[in-house]
Image (cartoon, grey):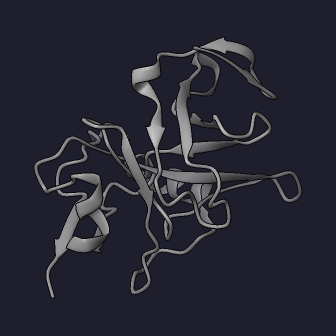
Amino acid sequence: MLIKTRLFGEIEIEDEKILHFPSGLVGMKPMKRFILLDTEREKPFRWLQSLDDAEIAFLTLEPRLVRPDYRVAVQQEEVHPLGITESTELLVLCIVTIYREPRTLTANLQGPLLINAENFQGRQVILIDSQYHNRHDILKEIAQLKPGNPISNEGILVIKTR
């Protein structure tokens, strides 16, 4: 399928890799279809390109790249519609914001995107009672990281029952 984007022009995507967010994203409910774009130049960042609005693309990052201890604690009913269990192959992304002045990069660790990598269903969840916030300074976190620590998604999702 050929799509038009503001940032990347026309690009060919595979239909089976379209991500579906049935509830949309916070503040952008009408946008339900996205594609993840990897570019060599922006690694480890990935672009979440809307297929419903060519003008919209979000820079994203796996939160464990900057916070190896990052965890998402959610209720079962939040992830059940996506077919997510603790054994599901899961992709967790956070939306990144770039500020020009002062030169800052922040990640929304309070509103992660949970994506079932097996059926391409996703949802943005809001972590209410957590230590994370929506403008987490990535550059500060990177400066505190110890080199050589392997990154893993093991244990990133904690499904709570009432």
Q: Quadrant of residue 43?
A: top right
Q: Nearer the viewer, residue 55 or 139?
A: 55
Furthest residue toward left: 87
Where, quadrant-wise, is the C terminus in this rendering?
Answer: bottom left
Residue 103 location, x and y as percent? 81, 53
Q: Nearer the viewer, residue 63 or 58?
A: 58
Where, quadrant-wise, is the N terminus in this rendering?
Answer: top right
Residue 146 location, x and y as percent? 37, 48
Instruction: Decide if residue 114 is on the left or right side of residue 31.
Output: left
Q: Nearer the viewer, residue 76 or 67?
A: 76
Q: Quadrant of residue 2?
A: top right
Residue that appears at 16% across and 46% down: 88
Q: Quadrant of residue 47?
A: top right
Furthest residue toward right: 101
Residue 20 location, x and y as percent? 45, 43
Residue 120 location, x and y as percent? 35, 38
Q: Nearer the viewer, residue 26 or 72?
A: 26
Residue that appears at 13% across and 56% down: 86
Q: Vertical placement of 40 versus 19: above or below? A: above
Q: Is residue 138 visible?
A: yes
